[in-house]
Image: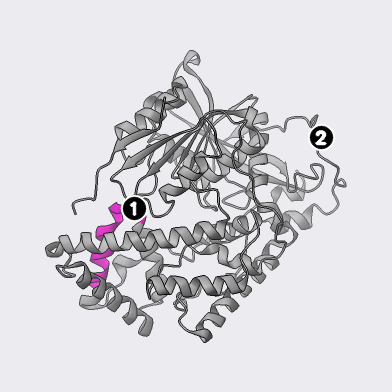
């Protein structure tokens, strides 16, 4: 085994493989890569018996334009179909989103929630996309102070604060360029889609099934653009629209403001439970009071940036709303921030890899905004609301990125087979408009909409029989709905 294959970081892979065979152009006759499975690391959960998960590593070029140059290894997991051979439909690759989310453990957890007919029909394949998890992880180091706690207020008010905000973005971009090095442009979704096709070839399959959630929908659409003849049955859930990442981030921020208003009204309707007031205006005032107080007097490293991060995480899933409302009440009552803190520390290794890969992928996928545009959009968001939620504005860092690409990642195309898109009507993380827009790039595709729902992640997640039935029939039997499917959702929860 060469030193390059033992490296986990991209920079390590670059240094260790400097003496490898010189780069040559891509050839269609390149033989399929080999892939052997064995035991999984302890970080991968065990599936319910009698199922068994196995893991392997796939060697792929760091730069697909030079396939005989530097290589990295992609971590892969597999759980075989539980049904008899005559029921098998092939492989189903799964991706949890991000960009930055690892897929090796996700194969186990997501498969457990899939309809039984799907589990019987498909080998479920997870993989950590390049730059994530155990696949040559991206490392941006301190990321311009992103992990310092408490972080500065992420909503700059006034010219001086705006300059400081832009400076932090510049520092973040510099840290990523230093940490990831020459591999920075190789973390694009386009190249990850090439990794997916190499995985398909290594598994000996003519076509792949695919289930992508959130960013996974973007990755699936990129694969369909490059390899339409290798697409089997593809489900894209909670769809990212076919926009530049920065434009998508702006749309998400506006959707989060709308969702926050719904949260205020919902909390007010349950005033006896949460104690934040009987009207949406009173709940808003309590929310603002908590945030303003944390900006002045952070608690054990928890300030306005950490508060906004908690709000961002909670608004995307209605089952987290009760904890958010209770956390605001607890802080105003006795100064406790425990209920507002995430289950896992933000500065953990997995979180650092996620945040690094998130920016690196977004900025490798297409041109970023100018600093002037970032400043103008900050001011527009503050005119919409003095305290907008800017946590998801990761692509703002692309304003100062190194190796900025001239073109954006291609998504979809007329040659792809019919694809099933799934969306929640009021999902603030991937707004419904994105699914409708991507559908235009995928002729023959169908959209399944879960109405009266406010959460991110739908198929095999919300427990909706209409959605799950349509997706399972498509994956197992190849049944493409005659028209778009409208499903009734659960509405807002009762705490």
- Mark 1 lies on a secondary structure that is loop
Q: Residue furthest top?
A: 86
Magenta stretch containing residue 325, yes or no?
Answer: yes
The image shows residue 439 at horizontal and vertical percentages of 50, 39
**Circle 2: is it few (<14), some (14-19), or many (20+) Cα within 10 Å?**
few
For the residue pair 36 and 311, the one nearer the viewer reads as 311
Which comes sooner in the sequence, label 1 or label 2? 2
Name the residue beneath numbered marker 2: 27
At a point 24% along the width and 50% down the height, the residue shown is 492
- Location of residue 110 by image quarter: top left
- Against 439, residue 166 (above or below) is below
For the residue pair 217 and 333, the one nearer the viewer reads as 217
At a point 58% along the width and 70% down the height, the residue shown is 373
Identify the disc placed on residue 389. Answer: none
Quarter that holds the N terminus: top right
Which region shows up in magenta? 316-330
Q: Is residue 488 left or right of residue 269?
A: right
Q: Is residue 387 left or right of residue 279?
A: right
The image shows residue 452 at horizontal and vertical percentages of 28, 45
Name the residue beneath numbered marker 1: 317
Q: Is residue 337 left or right of residue 48?
A: left
Inter-mark Cα distance, 1 to 2: 45 Å
- Against 210, residue 6 (above or below) is below
The image shows residue 74 at horizontal and vertical percentages of 64, 43
Quarter that holds the C terminus: bottom left
At a point 54% along the width and 61% down the height, the residue shown is 355
**Circle 1: is it few (<14), some (14-19), or many (20+) Cα within 10 Å?**
some
Magenta stretch containing residue 178, yes or no?
Answer: no
At a point 50% along the width and 75% down the height, the residue shown is 148
The image shows residue 380 at horizontal and vertical percentages of 46, 72
């Amino acid at each position: 085994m060469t030193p390059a294959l033992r490296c986990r970081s991209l920079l390590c892979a670059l240094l260790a493989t400097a003496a490898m065979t010189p780069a040559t152009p891509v050839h269609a006759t390149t033989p399929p890569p080999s892939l052997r499975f064995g035991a999984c690391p302890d970080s991968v959960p065990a599936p319910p018996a009698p199922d068994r998960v196995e893991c392997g590593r796939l060697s792929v070029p760091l730069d697909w334009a030079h396939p005989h140059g530097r290589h990295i290894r992609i971590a892969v997991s597999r759980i075989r179909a539980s049904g008899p051979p005559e029921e098998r439909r092939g492989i189903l690759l799964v991706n949890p989103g991000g960009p930055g989310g690892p897929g090796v453990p996700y194969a186990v957890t997501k498969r457990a929630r899939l309809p039984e007919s799907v589990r019987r029909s498909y080998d479920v394949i997870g993989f950590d996309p390049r730059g994530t998890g155990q696949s040559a992880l991206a490392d941006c180091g301190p990321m311009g102070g992103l992990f310092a706690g408490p972080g500065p207020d992420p909503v700059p008010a006034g010219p001086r604060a705006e300059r400081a905000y832009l400076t932090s973005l510049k520092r973040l971009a510099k840290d990523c360029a230093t940490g990831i090095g020459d591999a920075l442009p190789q973390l694009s979704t386009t190249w990850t889609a090439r990794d997916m096709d190499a995985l398909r070839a290594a598994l000996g399959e003519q076509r792949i099934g695919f289930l992508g959630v959130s960013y996974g929908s973007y990755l699936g659409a990129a694969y369909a653009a490059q390899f339409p003849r290798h697409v089997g049955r593809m489900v894209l859930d909670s769809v990212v629209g076919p926009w530049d990442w920065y434009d998508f981030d702006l749309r998400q921020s506006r959707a989060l403001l709308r969702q926050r208003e719904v949260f205020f009204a919902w909390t007010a309707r349950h005033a006896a439970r949460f104690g934040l007031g009987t009207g949406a205006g009173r709940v808003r005032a309590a929310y603002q009071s908590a945030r303003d107080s944390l900006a002045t007097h952070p608690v054990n490293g928890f300030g306005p940036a950490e508060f906004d991060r908690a709000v961002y995480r909670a608004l995307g899933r209605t089952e987290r709303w009760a904890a958010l409302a209770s956390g605001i009440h607890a802080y105003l009552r006795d100064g406790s921030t425990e209920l507002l803190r995430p289950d896992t520390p933000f500065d953990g290794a997995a979180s650092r890899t996620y945040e690094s890969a998130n920016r690196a992928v977004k900025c490798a996928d297409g041109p970023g905004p100018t600093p002037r545009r970032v400043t103008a959009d900050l001011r527009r968001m503050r005119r919409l609301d003095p305290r907008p939620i800017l946590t998801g504005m990761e692509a703002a860092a692309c304003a100062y990125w190194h190796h900025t690409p001239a073109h954006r990642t291609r998504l979809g195309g007329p040659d792809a087979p019919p694809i099933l898109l799934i969306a929640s009507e009021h999902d603030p993380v991937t707004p419904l408009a994105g699914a409708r827009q991507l559908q235009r790039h995928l002729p023959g595709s169908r959209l399944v909409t879960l109405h009266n729902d406010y959460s991110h992640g739908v198929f095999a997640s919300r427990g909706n029989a209409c959605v799950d039935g349509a997706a399972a029939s498509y994956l197992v039997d190849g049944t493409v709905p005659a028209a778009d499917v409208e499903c009734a959702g659960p509405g807002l929860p009762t705490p």
